[in-house]
Amino acid sequence: MSLSGTSDKTSDSPDVFQIQIGFIGAGNMAFGVAQGIIATGKVPPGNIIISAPSMNNLPRFKEKGVSVTHSNHEVVQASHLIFLAVKPHIIPQVLNEISQNVTKEHIIVSMAAGITIATLEELLPAGTRVIRIMPNLPCMLLEGALLLSCGSHAGQQEETLLKTLLGPCGLVEFGPESWIDAHVGLSGSGVAFVYVFAEALADGAVKMGMPSALARRIAAQTILGAGVLLRDSGKLPAELKAEVCTPGGTTIHGIHALEKGGFRAAAIGAVEAASERARELGNKQKKN
């Protein structure tokens, strides 16, 4: 197998400035992660190759200087680090197709919800280094939240490599695989929950007489500003909430309305439901 462009060091210790990276799948998550890797300045776009069955999503990668192909085999043969960025139900088909070309030199990173490390290792050659990673949609803007978990043959070296490459994508955290499904509910699906909240905030302002377009812009900026403050202040959500709530003021009356409407319970339930669905997908895949 050709791994041109990798370091002169052993393949177990690749130089991130020279590593060849492949993506199988060309959706939004792949695009966001690829942009983050390019943003490090450590991997030239020409060292990245991506495959997809059609040309629908490939032009935006070509514009970044990334090589594109319709061949998954070409990606495997040209790459050391391979991201699986296809839908969960397609993973077994893809791994069956490429597994004969996967060697111990490869690191396989799955971005598929519900597909466990055990399933990935079972479908790949013995000893393959496997990592599960769950990004979210804001990775496209380099403002994502990513949780990584290493398989039985991957360790600190692979964690460090992924941390270096994915840092520009946003917040990168490591944890046990048991946290992955919760991360799907919290951050992967949570992005959509925030959009529902933003829509509701804007609708509330429209109800009170504000033009719709203006209400949407202000709702978006409100959520952005609140998120940055929560991330960077080091304070707990409850502390920041208390700073806004003056006795008898407007905010505490609004929060009371949220509590009466079951907002907190609904948010917890939404994360739980999405997490359980991710777990169900994994269990279903095991049975298949």
Image (spheres, grey):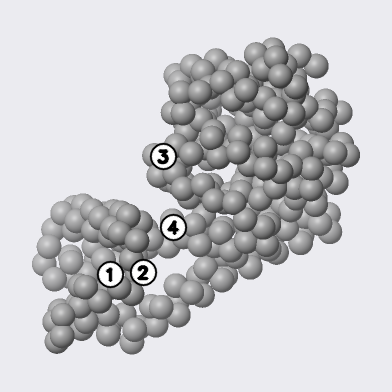
- Whether residues under marks 1 and 2 lie with C-beta atoms below 8 angstroms apart, the answer is yes
- Whether residues under marks 2 and 3 lie with C-beta atoms below 8 angstroms apart, the answer is no
Q: Position of residue 11 (x, y in %)?
A: 74, 24
On screen, 26 above or below 249? above
Which mark lies nearer to you, 4 or 3? 3
Q: Which mark is residue 231?
A: none
Q: Secondary structure at mark 1?
A: helix
Q: Earlier in the sequence, mark 1 or mark 4?
A: 4
Q: Which mark is residue 236?
A: 2
| Residue receiving disc 1 | 240
Gap between marks 3 and 1 measured at Cα: 25 Å
* Quadrant assignment for the N terminus: top right
Residue placed at 54% from the left, 33% from the top?
165
Q: Earlier in the sequence, mark 3 or mark 1?
A: 3
Amino acid of disc 1: Leu
Mark 1, other Cα within 10 Å: few <14 / some 14–19 / many ≥20: some
